[in-house]
Amino acid sequence: MVDRRRRSRRHLRPTRARRGRRRAGAARPARSQRIDLVGPHGPKPLSVKPKARGPNNINSGLFSAKPRVEYCYARALADAPALAGKVVVEFAVSAAGELGAVSIASSTLRHPEVERCIVDAIERHTSWSSADADAVIRWQFDFTRR
């Protein structure tokens, strides 16, 4: 008599076709472009004056703007595939958690549309908790293709 459990396990194993093996000469499927805005140990601000807000507070404030910033860069990559560089954004956050003026401090990206989109993303999509004092934050976005 055949052990039905063993047979059913063999039956559920994926076949070669289901494992995703390609035929010789078959083209590899296109992968989506990966855009990293975070280093291996997490992002850190370039400067915070005074030291009223720590990196974790700033990361959580910028968390909701990150997808929009990535979208800004990805949209520009369609027109300029070699686009890469760094954008330093400077903004003020009050002790009450209100965002002040946002501006581009420096940029090697040289793409005004992306820079405007980043400023807009930070103005619209950030939320800040209260802190001990007002702070001026300089944050660097590093846009590189991987």
Image (spheres, rainbow, N blue to C red):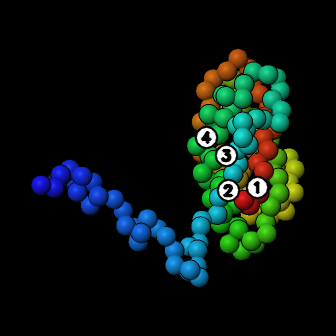
| Secondary structure found at label 2 | loop
Residue 53 against residue 71 in the figure, above or below: above
Rendered position, 10 above or below 99: below
The residues tagged by marks 2 and 4 sit, at their Cα atoms, a distance apart of: 15 Å
Which numbered disc flags the more N-terminal residue, 2 or 1?
2
* 4 or 3: tag closer to the N-terminus: 4
The answer to whether residue 100 of the structure is visible from this angle is no
Q: Provide residue 51's location: percent of width, then percent of height.
A: 79, 22
Residue 136 position within the rendered picture, expressed as x and y whole percent measured from the top left: 79, 32
Which residue appears at 71% of the width and 74% of the height? 79
Mark 2 or mark 3: whose residue is earlier in sequence:
2
Q: Dot 2, how many residues are within 10 Å of its Cα: few (below 14), some (14-19), or many (20+)?
A: some
Q: Amino acid at mark 1?
A: Phe
Neighbourhood count class around disc 4 (C-alpha, 10 Å): few under 14, some 14–19, many 20 upward: some
Element assignment for label 4: helix
Instruction: Please tell me how crowded label 1 is: few (under 14), some (14-19), or many (20+) other residues with Cα within 10 Å.
Output: many
State the mark number for residue 122: 3
Residue designated by label 1 = 143
Give the quarter of the image for residue 102: top right
Residue identifier under label 2: 35
Q: Nearer the viewer, mark 4 or mark 3?
A: 4
